[in-house]
Image (tube, rainbow, N blue to C red):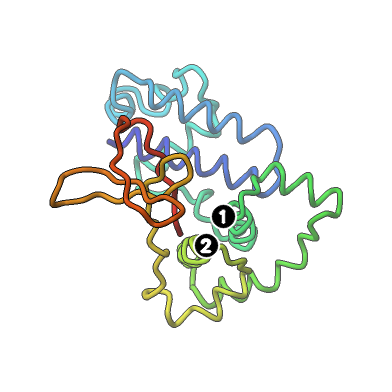
């Protein structure tokens, strides 16, 4: 649906403006995106009937944003959005890298102000990754792969790690996560032959489990 596509772009514009550090505008774009999603009539039909005036009549969508919606309906693109993606490419990469580390954009900004994170230290490596990947989207995809691979092994990683792993990105796989059963701290095993659970005590003896399934504790083993 064209409404959802445009709403998605408007939300992404809001995110890019936040990354850029622009105040107030992100809220307006998100509000406009929400109004599009709530429309009972397809936005294209609204435009066909009344043109730009029809879009202007929708509560919560300002003139500047309605013009961008019209541009998309006419061309399938929004020039402002494309320019914003290019302008914020390096910041997108740095922001996404920290997101994979569990640091939100708001926290990143706060830490940068406190000098707990020196933002400029990451600019050079982000720029190099952008040149290597060819786009912010591909750079973020590469960071995601490295983050999943490293995280499953409890390894730390930097943007530079992506350079080192670039030629093997397609082979990087998260370590398989296995869950094993325990009862009161003792490991358990399932006997396929007897169709029963057994608890292995400290002495290595197999004791038939007489409890309920809900008493079994499943621990994640990486």
Q: Residue at x 43, y 74 (%)?
A: 169
Which residue is nearer to you in this view: 47 or 190?
190
Secondary element type, mark 2: helix
Specify whether 21 is left or right of 175.
right
Q: Quadrant of residue 164?
A: bottom right
Where does residue 181 sit, x and y in percent of width and height? 37, 46
- Up/down of 175 relative to 65, above or below: below
Secondary element type, mark 1: helix
Q: Which residue is mark 1?
A: 100
Specify whether 146 is left or right of 159.
left
- Up/down of 141 relative to 215, above or below: below
Q: Quadrant of residue 3?
A: top left
Circle nearer the N terminus (2, 1): 1
Q: Residue at x 42, y 64 (%)?
A: 174
Q: Residues within 10 Å of mark 1 (few under 14, many from 20)?
A: some
- Up/down of 219 relative to 150, above or below: above
Q: Which residue is mark 2?
A: 147
Specify whether 38 is left or right of 196.
right
Q: Residues within 10 Å of mark 2 (few under 14, many from 20)?
A: many
CB under 8 Å between callouts 2 and 1?
A: yes
């Amino acid at each position: 649906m064209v409404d959802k596509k445009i709403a998605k772009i408007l939300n992404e514009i809001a995110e890019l403006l936040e990354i850029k550090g622009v105040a107030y505008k992100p809220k307006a774009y998100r509000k406009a995106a929400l109004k599009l999603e709530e429309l009972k009539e397809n936005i294209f039909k609204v435009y066909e009937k009344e043109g730009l005036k029809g879009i202007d009549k929708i509560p919560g969508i300002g003139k500047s944003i309605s013009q961008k919606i019209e541009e998309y309906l006419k061309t399938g693109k929004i020039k402002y959005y494309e320019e914003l993606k290019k302008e914020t490419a390096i910041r997108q990469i740095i922001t996404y890298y920290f997101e994979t580390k569990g640091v939100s954009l708001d926290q990143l900004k706060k830490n940068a102000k406190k000098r707990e994170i020196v933002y400029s230290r990451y600019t050079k490596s982000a720029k190099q990754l952008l040149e290597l990947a060819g786009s912010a989207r591909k750079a973020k995809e590469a960071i995601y792969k490295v983050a999943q691979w490293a995280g499953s092994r409890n390894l730390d990683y930097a943007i530079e790690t992506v350079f080192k792993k670039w030629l093997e990105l397609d082979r990087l796989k998260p370590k398989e996560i296995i869950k094993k059963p325990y009862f009161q701290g003792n490991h358990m095993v399932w006997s396929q032959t007897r169709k029963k659970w057994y608890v292995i005590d400290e002495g290595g003896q197999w004791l038939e489990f007489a409890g309920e399934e809900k008493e079994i504790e499943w621990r994640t083993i990486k």
